[in-house]
Image: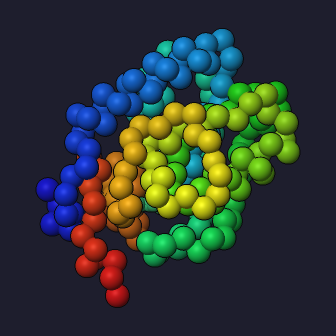
Amino acid sequence: MHKDIQSVLFTEEQIKNRVKEMGSRISADFKNLDPIFVGILKGSFIFMSDLMRAVDMDCTVDFMGVSSYGRGSVTTGAVKITKDLNESIENRSIILIEDILDSGVTLNYLVNCLEVRKPASISIAALLNKPARREKSVKPDYIGFDVPDAFVVGYGLDYAERYRNLPYIGVLKPLIYAD
Ligand code: IMP
Ligand code: MG
């Protein structure tokens, strides 16, 4: 285990099994709908790549870049789109892919922003859900795991751009982000 990690919440094996289950459900729900998977950069990139390979249907992929955190561990409340979609989403079924649903500020903002472009539907798949910290109402359709109110990293999730490459999800030692 990495020296900055306090405890492992989900092992590589547990994540793999859960992502497979999510993929099966999404395949059943979107069969013949040719959905677009929209990954929210950067945190979703590992989850997205595993989830894509766990679905059995025709689909396309696109990415959006948003920033709301800077280097810190607490949201600033402001969302900025740093990269927009390349594809048109008009009349398409959208599946937004997020690493973690925390305050809900990011997804609430994105859903409102994308609805204006008249997609057929917008669904949300988040690997992790931290319900204790919700400020904005967001209804996720697919959730991998609920997590406690702690700062977690690994499997794409970062603190100050570090730890994304850990194959498991763990709680970061608080002394790492205390100043
Ligand atoms: P929200 O807008 O507060 O829901 O935050 C969503 C974004 O904040 C996620 O996509 C993550 O990038 C980041 N985030 C929130 N909680 C954590 C955490 O515990 N670890 C790492 N990133 C987090
Ligand atoms: Mg982040």
Above or below — where is 105 with respect to 64?
Answer: below
Residue 122 seen in the current view: yes
- In this view, the residue farthest toward the front is 132
Give the quarter of the figure containing the C terminus.
bottom left
Corner quadrant of residue 10: top left
Give the quarter of the figure containing the N terminus.
bottom left
* Color style of the picture: rainbow
Q: Residue at x 57, y 49 (%)?
A: 40
Q: Position of residue 100 (x, y in %)?
A: 47, 51
- In this view, the residue farthest toward the top is 32
Above or below — where is 52 with respect to 6?
Answer: above
Above or below — where is 113 with respect to 58?
Answer: below
In the rendered picture of this protein, how many numbered marks are placed on residues? 0
Corner quadrant of residue 15: top left
Q: Position of residue 167 (x, y in %)?
A: 26, 46
> Is residue 46 shown left or right of residue 136?
left
Q: Residue at x 59, y 18 (%)?
A: 29
- In this view, the residue farthest toward the bottom is 179
Q: Residue at x 35, y 63 (%)?
A: 150
> Is residue 156 shown left or right of residue 80?
left
Above or below — where is 150 with respect to 89?
Answer: below
Residue 47 seen in the current view: no
Q: Residue at x 77, y 50 (%)?
A: 112
> Is residue 155 shown left or right of residue 123?
left
Give whichever of 129, 63 is nearer the camera. 129
